Amino acid sequence: MRHISTVSSSGTPTTHIFTSSRALCPGQCSGSRSCCLLVFRFSLSLNTLLFARWLTAAVVFALRVLCFLSRTDVATVTPWLAPVVWEGTFEPELLDGVYRQKNVSIAVTVFAVGKYIRFLKDFLETAEQHFFVGFKVHVYVFTDRPAELPKVEMAAGRQLTVHPVPAAKRWQEISARRMEMIQRLIEETLLPGTDFIFCLDVDSKFHGRWGAESLGSLVAVVHPGYYKTERGGFPYERRPASRAYMAPGLGDFYYCGGAFGGDLHEVRLLAKTCRENFEADAKEGIEAAWQEESHLNRYMWLNKPSKVLSPEFLWQDFKPREREIHVVRFSGVVKNYAEIRPN
Ligand SMILES: CC(=O)N[C@H]1[C@@H](OP(=O)(O)OP(=O)(O)OC[C@H]2O[C@@H](n3ccc(=O)[nH]c3=O)[C@H](O)[C@@H]2O)O[C@H](CO)[C@H](O)[C@@H]1O
Ligand SMILES: [Mn+2]
C-alpha cells in the first residue's frame, strides 16, 4: 500500500503503476498471477483516482489565479492601502470561516418612515437569502408605522427589533436624522456585545452574497453613480460655509449614504460627528447638498475607511449593468420620488 501511494505522487501514472505492481509481486504474493493482476488493477484505479484529484485541484488553482489576475480592470487597493472589495478579489468560504470562528455578531439599521415601509418586506426577505447567511444578525427597524411591519420568517440566530420614531414632514430630515438614531442605538443598546454594524437604505434589495468580505473597522461603499467620475465631478458640498465642505481638488471617492458600516466605536464616532456637523450647519441655516451623505463624505476624507466596498454593494436598478460589475449584491429599487416622499 505504502509503495503504491509513493508511486502515485510521482505524477507519471501509467508506467509507474505497472512497475509498482510488479515490484510488489515477488515479496508479497510469491508470484501468483491472479494476485498480481488484482494488485495491478487496484493500483491502476487508485492511481487514476489520485491523478484525477490532483488534476482537478490544479485546474481549480489555475482558475483562481486567473480570476485574481483578471481584476486588473478596477482598483483593488486605495493609496492608503485599504482593500477595495470586488468580486474575484476574495475567497468567500475562507473569509466566512475566519469570522464564524470568532462568532461575530452583526447589527443592521434600516429606516422605514412613512410610505417607505412598503420596501421593508423585500429588504428583509432578500437579506435572509444573501446577507451574512449563517451569522448572528440583528436587524433594527426604525419606523413610525410599527403596525404595518411585514411578517418575515427569520433563520435561527437572526432577529428583528422595532424602534418607533416620529413621522416627518421632510424626507431630508428623515435621511439626516438617521445619524442621531444610529449613535443612540450604539450607545444605549449595542455597546458592548455587538461586533459590527451596517446602516442601509430600505429602498433596496439583496441580489447576491454580502458576507464577511465587507467587515472592517470603518467601511464605506463607492457610490454607483460616481465610480468612474473624476474627483472634480463628485457632488460634494462645495459651499465653504458648510461643515461638509470639500474644496476643489480634494477627495478620494464619492461614497454613498445608503450603505456604510464598521465596528461600533468607529461608526459611533462617524454618526456623532456627522450629526453634530449637520446640526451646527442647521443652526446657521445651511443644509449640505446631500444631507448626511455630504457629511459622511467629508468624514471619510478626514478619516480614511479601512475597507472600501465596490458599487457591487450598492447598485441602482435603473442603471444598466456595467462591465466591471460581475455581481450585484445590493441594489436600490426604482421608485417614484414624487409619490413616495412626504415633500
Ligand atoms: C443609494 C444612496 O446612497 N442613497 C442616498 C441618496 O438618495 P436616495 O434617493 O436613495 O434617498 P432615499 O429616498 O432612499 O432616502 C434615504 C433613506 O431614508 C429613509 N427614508 C427616506 C424618506 C422617507 O420618507 N422615509 C424613509 O424612511 C429610507 O430608509 C431611505 O432608504 O441620498 C440621500 C441623501 O439624503 C441619502 O444619503 C441616501 O442614502
Ligand atoms: Mn435610497
Image (tube, rainbow, N blue to C red):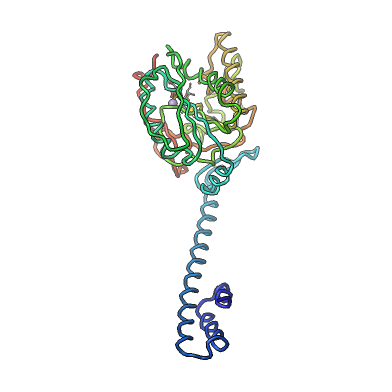
Q: Quadrant of the C terminus?
A: top left
Count of all numbered marks drawn on residues in the image? 0
Residue at image x 53%, y 23%? 293
Image region (quadrant) for ligand 1: top left
Rendered view: 215 above or below 109? below
Quadrant hosting residue 230? top right
Q: Position of residue 6 (x, y in %)?
A: 58, 75
Nearer-the-camera pick, 303 or 79: 303
Q: Position of residue 71 (x, y in %)?
A: 53, 48
Q: Quadrant of the N terminus?
A: bottom right
Nearer-the-camera pick, 81 or 31: 31
Quadrant hosting residue 123? top left
Rendered view: 133 above or below 252? below
Q: Position of residue 291 (x, y in %)?
A: 51, 19
Rendered view: 195 above or below 23? above
Describe residue 165's horizontal placement relative to residue 72 as left or right. left
